[in-house]
Image (spheres, rainbow, N blue to C red):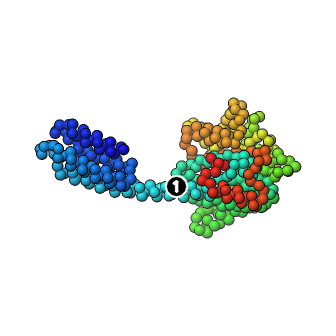
Amino acid sequence: MIPLILLLIISVVDWNTSGEFRIISWIVVVPGVSAAVCGVRATALFAALSVAMYLLNDRIWPYEYRSGLPDLILVATGGVLATAACAIRIREQRTTLHMRDVVETTRNTVLRPLPPSWAGLEHAALYLAADTEARVGGDFYDIQPSPYGTRVIVGDVQGKGLGAVTAAAALLGSFREWGYHERDLAVVAERLETRMRRYQEYGTAMGRDESDRFATAVVVGFPPEGAAEPDMLELVYFGHEPPLAVGPRGVRELAGETLLPLGLGELYPTAVPRVARLSLDVDETLLLVSDGVTEARDKAGVFYPLRERLAAAVVRDPSVVVPGRLVARVGDDTQRHSAGKLTDDTTALAVRRTDGRADGRADGRADGRADGRADGRADGRGLS
């Protein structure tokens, strides 16, 4: 409608002006506007209509007031160029949409959508890539059910770009396998360290300098159903931000002994991953974040005070401990603090136990079915 209205306005104005002020040649902008908002056929149609309207308007005037052949050539040439420009725009737009589909597929492969109440946990996640066009970066997270309880991981690969994404994918693949099959969380942690070092070796063999690539991570083990100590968690810290237990009574940090980041274990090859055992009350939500949250700065360079802000939010509204509301609060508050200028990938994962109505079971058949449902969805509710 915009090019059509513009065509009619120029024609009507030209009919109602004096011979000394002819604007019919302005009609050349009509196919140009059409090229920006319409398809190729519509642009070609408006180019032809512009030429026809020019000829019609120009012939109405006496000979001495006609714009003549030069402006006709201008209008015709403008229509041809506008049609060609529209064709290029459509082609580039299709390429861009295809690339976005590829990026979205990559994101869903690395950060698979999770079913609601997966493996006995109510959960919600927030993921904001610093590169808004890429939509996926080096941060990663996952929830994996197993016969030995539910395992949760949140991590952050050093660096940006494709190398960080592929490293995150490698670690997640290892976590999903060993997190299911291994009883001991310390062994799962060892396998993650080994996988990161194998990734470094492979990258170096391919001619990429991956020797300094590492990843921080925290691995959490929730006890299986019927465990003697259902409130006890197992945690392994690889130089990552400690999780926070957010409940109606306030916010507390679940701190334990921190190991070197994944990929740096060769500096202390005899070190054994230490598993911390800490309690999480049934009414508390476990919040795990990446350093994109805690290192977000305001205009004065002040870091985002996550724990203090959450404590104040819980006092005002105890229902903020619900995982969906909790990650939304963290995401919104982080962006307000940094004025929307994220310099690093920002991830927050909140989990808390359900009342037993779990969709995921600790056996291979249910695990496979649940994974299939999650991968088949366009957008899982567990990924926000």
Q: Is residue 168 above or below residue 291?
A: below
Q: Position of residue 80 (x, y in %)?
A: 29, 55
Label 1: few (<14), some (14–19) or many (≥20) C-alpha neighbours in 10 Å: some
Reading the image, the residue beneath label 1 is 100
Disc 1 residue type (three-letter):
Arg
- Taking the spot 58% from the left edge, 57% from the top edge, the residue there is 105
Task: Say whether residue 197 is visible.
Answer: yes
> What is the residue that sits farthest to the left in this orientation?
64
Q: Position of residue 289 (x, y in %)?
A: 67, 46
Q: Nearer the viewer, residue 73 or 47?
A: 47
Q: Nearer the viewer, residue 177 or 75?
A: 75
Q: Position of residue 249 (x, y in %)?
A: 77, 34
Q: Is residue 261 above or below residue 298?
A: below
Q: Position of residue 169 (x, y in %)?
A: 64, 59
Q: Nearer the viewer, residue 297 or 185?
A: 185
- Taking the spot 75% from the left edge, 35% from the top edge, the residue there is 248
Where does the N terminus fall, quadrant-wise? top left
Quarter of the image where one finds residue 367: bottom right
